[in-house]
């Protein structure tokens, strides 16, 4: 992914760091980063917070946030981003399927957040396709979102 390479080069040139917290993508975001030679210059951690207990224990998401808004929500992804410590951050939580969807949050619902320094963007997506398609689409969109945050400063 050229976008991932661009992100790594951008951050490395500034001696900045990158970390990720992901749920439905199950490590695919981190895998895309470490697939790029030189990723170790910027990548500090990748947390697969698949269970809510990990979101609360490791990322310090308040249990009340998950109870009130659900694990797949803007509020939870915002808290996941806050639980990371790097200059650039990505957080993903969603319902990849084939089960787990509801009328309010159908299969394919994915919330993606990115933060660079003090700027943050969180977007709700509704992807169509099977589990693999939803997960890959979420990975692509996560890097696109972070790259958009970096663009004004590059």
Image: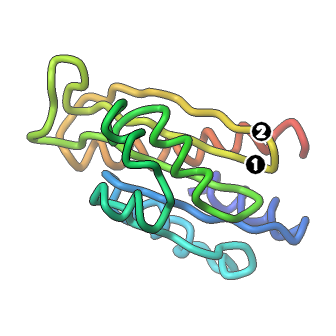
Q: Residue at x 37, y 48 (%)?
A: 63
Q: State left or right for residue 29 relative to residue 108.
A: right
Q: Position of residue 37 (x, y in %)?
A: 64, 79
Question: Marks 2 and 1, Cα distance to the nearest angstrom?
Answer: 5 Å
Q: State left or right for residue 108 relative to residue 118.
A: left
Residue nearer the viewer, 55 or 100: 55
Q: Are marks 2 and 1 in contact (CB under 8 Å)?
A: yes
Whether 151 is drawn above or below 81: the answer is: above
Quarter of the rendering containing residue 119: top right
Q: Position of residue 104 (x, y in %)?
A: 23, 18
Q: Quadrant of the N terminus?
A: bottom right
Whether 2 is drawn above or below 123: the answer is: below
Q: Position of residue 28 (x, y in %)?
A: 40, 62
Q: Residue at x 34, y 37 (%)?
A: 72
Element assignment for label 1 = strand
Residue nearer the viewer, 34 or 27: 27
Q: Position of residue 20 (x, y in %)?
A: 55, 61
Residue at the extreme top: 103
Q: Residue at x 15, y 25 (%)?
A: 102
Quarter of the rendering containing residue 71: top left
Mark seen at residue 144: none
Q: State left or right for residue 52 relative to residue 43.
A: left
Q: Residue at x 71, y 37 (%)?
A: 148
The residue beneath circle 2 is 119
Q: State left or right for residue 75 relative to residue 2.
A: left
Residue nearer the viewer, 141 or 74: 74
The residue beneath circle 1 is 116
Circle 2 packing at 10 Å, graded few (<14), some (14-19), many (20+), is few
Circle 1 packing at 10 Å, graded few (<14), some (14-19), many (20+), is many
């Amino acid at each position: 992914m050229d976008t991932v390479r661009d992100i790594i080069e951008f951050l490395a040139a500034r001696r900045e760091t990158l970390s990720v917290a992901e749920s439905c993508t199950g490590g695919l975001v981190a895998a895309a980063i470490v697939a790029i030679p030189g990723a170790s210059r910027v990548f500090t951690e990748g947390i697969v917070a698949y269970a809510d207990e990990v979101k609360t224990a490791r990322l310090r998401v308040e249990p009340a946030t998950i109870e009130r808004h659900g694990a797949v929500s803007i509020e939870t992804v915002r808290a996941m981003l806050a639980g990371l410590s790097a200059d650039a951050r990505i957080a993903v939580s969603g319902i990849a399927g084939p089960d787990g969807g509801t009328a309010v949050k159908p299969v394919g619902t994915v919330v993606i957040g990115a933060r660079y320094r003090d700027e943050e963007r969180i977007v709700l997506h509704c992807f169509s396709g099977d589990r693999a398609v939803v997960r890959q689409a979420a990975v692509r969109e996560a890097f696109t979102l972070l790259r958009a945050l970096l663009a004004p400063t590059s």
